[in-house]
Amino acid sequence: MTKTTATILSILSALILAFLLFSSCGEESPEDRLFDQLPMEVKSCITDRTKIVHGIDVSKWQGSIDWSKVAQAGYKYAFIRVSDGLTYIDSYFPQNWAGAKNNGIIRGAYQFFRPNQDAVQQAQLLLDKMGPLQKGDLPPVIDVEDTGSLSATEVANQVGKWINYVESKLGMKPIIYSGYYFWKDNVKSTAFGDYLLWLPWYHDYQDTSFCPSTPDPWTKWTFWQWTSSGSVPGISGDVDLNIFDGTIDDLKKITYNYEEICGDNYCGTNETYQSCPQDCLMMNFVMPKDGDELYNPVLFKVEADANITKVNYYADGYLFGT
């Protein structure tokens, strides 16, 4: 190698090194800045798998339903379709709406929303068909999974009109049903984070390694529609199955005019043996709250007049204290 060649190679090496250092330490590219601004994907897991409530959602596609069998099978709530926009009224809604109520199933009405139709007229149609909410009914649902060939901004504006109208008439916030990818790609709005999310994501909820993603701005789903091919006594063919993330008491708290009712066979948080003996035992197990340690001694509430002489403490079937 000649001296001249060596010198040229040294200069080239220095230039390459300087370029690499400048590239790595220089200002972010527009692509880098865009990536930094993208919302992070949020995984939302079931809070406690021992505290979930099972429910269904139905429309005319399920035909005539034997609601007594649905109730006996342990399903506690049902979302029932009112219409597909303005053009199709679900003829099965009246019998499903009454059937669920008559069999003690907590009910909620939903409407498949068409953004390219008048949002207020759709909202009023739902209110007319649903009638006045009764105590214990769930908030109505706007089913957002169609664009009507509108832009994301236009879809979001239409959703807002529907929600504002329904909320102003009922005095309670509706529930939003929408999928992760649909909302992310076709609505792109962060304006509705105060509304409960009903999330469709078809994956077995019993898979403890899986948690569905929630679209921005939500960090938590309230209802998870986990399959469209469920089998339920009293219903012919497939039906959508859902879980509610919480206890039946938690579910009741989001219903219309919620209050603890003595005689409903459930001992509510503020009910006691003295105030409602038909619902509450003398000694009731009180589930630890979030943040309670396992050794927290407040695991039972014992009424003052309870004639108790001895309490045994068990864990997994083993006596560990008296």
Image (spheres, rainbow, N blue to C red):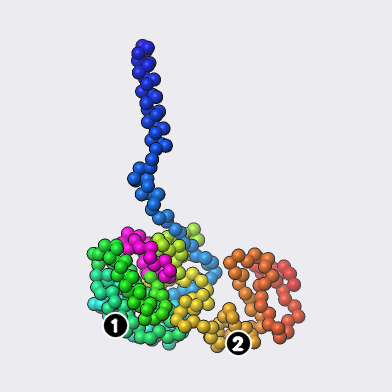
From which residue to which does the magenta span run?
Answer: 177-198
Image quadrant in which you'd find residue 238: bottom left
Quickly name the residue at label 2. 276
Please rate how many residues cluster around mark 2, counting C-alpha atoms within 10 Å: few if below 14, some from 14 to 19, many from 20.
Answer: some
- Give how far across and how far down residue 2 sits, in percent: 36, 11
* Residue at left offset 58%, top offset 67%: 290
Q: Secondary structure at mark 2?
A: loop
**Residue type highlighted by circle 1:** Ser
Q: Disc 1, disc 2: CB below 8 Å?
A: no
Under circle 1, the secondary element is loop
Q: Quadrant of residue 260?
A: bottom right
Image height check: is 128 above or below 192? below
The residue beneath circle 1 is 91
| 25 w.r.t. 293: above or below | above
Q: Residues within 10 Å of mark 1 (few under 14, many from 20)?
A: some
Q: Is residue 208 left or right of residue 148?
A: right
Instruction: Give percent across and percent down for residue 268.
Output: 57, 80
Q: Is residue 149 magenta?
A: no
User: Observer-nearest residue: 226 or 260?
Assistant: 260
Work out whether residue 270 can be spotted.
Answer: yes
